[in-house]
Amino acid sequence: MKLFTPIKFRNIELKNRIVMSPMCMYSAEDGVANDFHFVHYGSRAQGGVGLVMVEATGVEPRGRITNKCLGIWNDEQALALKKIVDFVHQNSESKIGIQLAHAGRKGSTWENRQISIEEGWETIAPSPIPFHHSERTPHVLTIEEIKNLVEDFQKATKRAVEAGFDVIEIHGAHGYLIHQFLSPLSNTRTDEYGGNAENRARFLMEIVDAVNSEITENQALFVRISGTEYAENGWEISDSVELAKILKTKNVNLIDVSSGGNISGVTIPLNPGYQVPLAEAVKKNADIKTGAVGLITDANHAEEILENEQADLIFLAREILRNPYFAVQSAWENDEENFYPHQYLRAKPAK
C-alpha cells in the first residue's frame, strides 16, 4: 500500500503517510506541557504513525485559544516539549512536528465562548471585527505590533528547533490570526496588510520568511490553510491555489488543507473526506505536496486518496484519538510492515 511507503521533505523522511493531525487538548498550565501530553503524544508514536503533530501552540500568551492551551514563548515551555520530542525519537520511528499558532480574535475563550478580559485577555485582529457579534471588538493591530508578532513566530521557531522538532507547521487556517489577515471578510485594512490578495497575505509571507531564517534542511516546513471558508465573497479554493503557488517559492514543503473556521454560522458539508477535493485542487494546480484531513477513518479510504494522487499525506484527527494504534493495526490487516514497539512483539499477529 502507498499508505505505508516513505516520503521525504528536505532531509526528513517519514516512514509512512499517516499523520496525527494537530488537535487542541486544553490541558496545559501556563502553556506548559505535562504528563498528559507526554502520554498522549508518546502513545501515538508507539502506535506507528509516520508523523506526530503537536497541537496549536501559542507563540505568545494572547496567541492561545484558551488558558489551557500550549505555548512556546518561554524556555520552560520549550523544555517540557523537548521531553516529548526526545521520547518520540528514542522509542519509535515517528517524526514529530509542532503547529505554531496565534488565535487572534478567536482567543480568550473556554468551551467555545469568549471569557472576560479579567479571566482571559484582550483579543487582537487585523480589523475591528469580532468573530461573533456577541463578542468584544478586538484590538486592531498596528504595523509595529504586526512586526512584533512576526518576531514572536521567529523566536518560537528557534525554540522548536532547539527542542528537536522535525517539522514546523504554521497555522494559517480555521479563522485564527493568519487566516483573519488572509480573508477579505475579516481584513478590511487599507495599509500594506490589507486590500488586495498580496497585501492580505503579507503577514503570512513575513512569518514564513522568519521561520525559514531559523530552520535548516533538517526541519520541514508545512503551512495549514483553510481551502475555503464557505462564505460569499470570502476566501475560496482559487485563493488557496494562488497562495500555495507563492508558498512553494518560499521553500514550504507541504500545504495541509483544511477548511472553514473564520466566519460564524456557515454551513459546512460534513461527510467522509469532505476536504479531500480541496487538497487535490491545491496539489494539482499549485504543483505542491498536500495533506488531506477531514473524517478519514479507515486505511482503504486513505489509500484511495493517495492512489488517486489527491494528496501526499493523510492527517487523522478523531480517528487517531479513538485508536492510537491505527497505523500498526492497519499495517497488520493489510500485510504491510510498520513500526511496532519491541516490548509488544509477543502480541504481533503471525503471518
Image (spheres, rainbow, N blue to C red):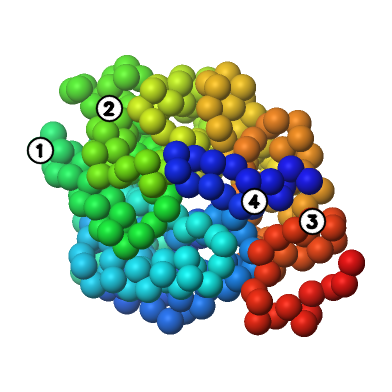
The amino acid type found where label 1 is placed reads: Glu
Left or right position of 303 against 221? right
Judged from the image, the secondary structure of the residue bearing numbered disc 3 is loop
In this rendering, is residue 204 above or below 241? below
The amino acid type found where label 3 is placed reads: Glu
Separation of disc 4 and disc 3 at Cα? 11 Å
The residue under label 3 is: 336
Q: Residue furthest left?
A: 144
Q: Position of residue 91 (x, y in %)?
A: 53, 72
Of labels 1 and 4, the one closer to you: 4
Separation of disc 1 and disc 4 at Cα? 43 Å
Q: Earlier in the sequence, mark 1 or mark 3?
A: 1
Residue closest to the eye, 269 or 89: 89
Give the class, few, some or many, for how many residues have Cα within 10 Å of label 2's Cα (few <14, many ≥20).
Answer: some
Left or right position of 219 against 162? right
Q: Residue at x 61, y 52 (%)?
A: 15
The amino acid type found where label 4 is placed reads: Asn
Q: Position of residue 166 (x, y in %)?
A: 42, 53
The residue under label 2 is: 202
Separation of disc 2 and disc 1 at Cα? 14 Å
Residue closest to the eye, 287 or 338: 338
The circle drawn on residue 335 is none
The residue under label 4 is: 16
Look at the image and tell me in which quarter the C terminus lies: bottom right
In this rendering, is residue 21 above or below 281? below
Q: Residue at x 41, y 33 (%)?
A: 252
The residue under label 1 is: 144
Q: Earlier in the sequence, mark 3 or mark 2?
A: 2
Separation of disc 1 and disc 3 at Cα? 53 Å
Residue closest to the eye, 9 or 176: 9
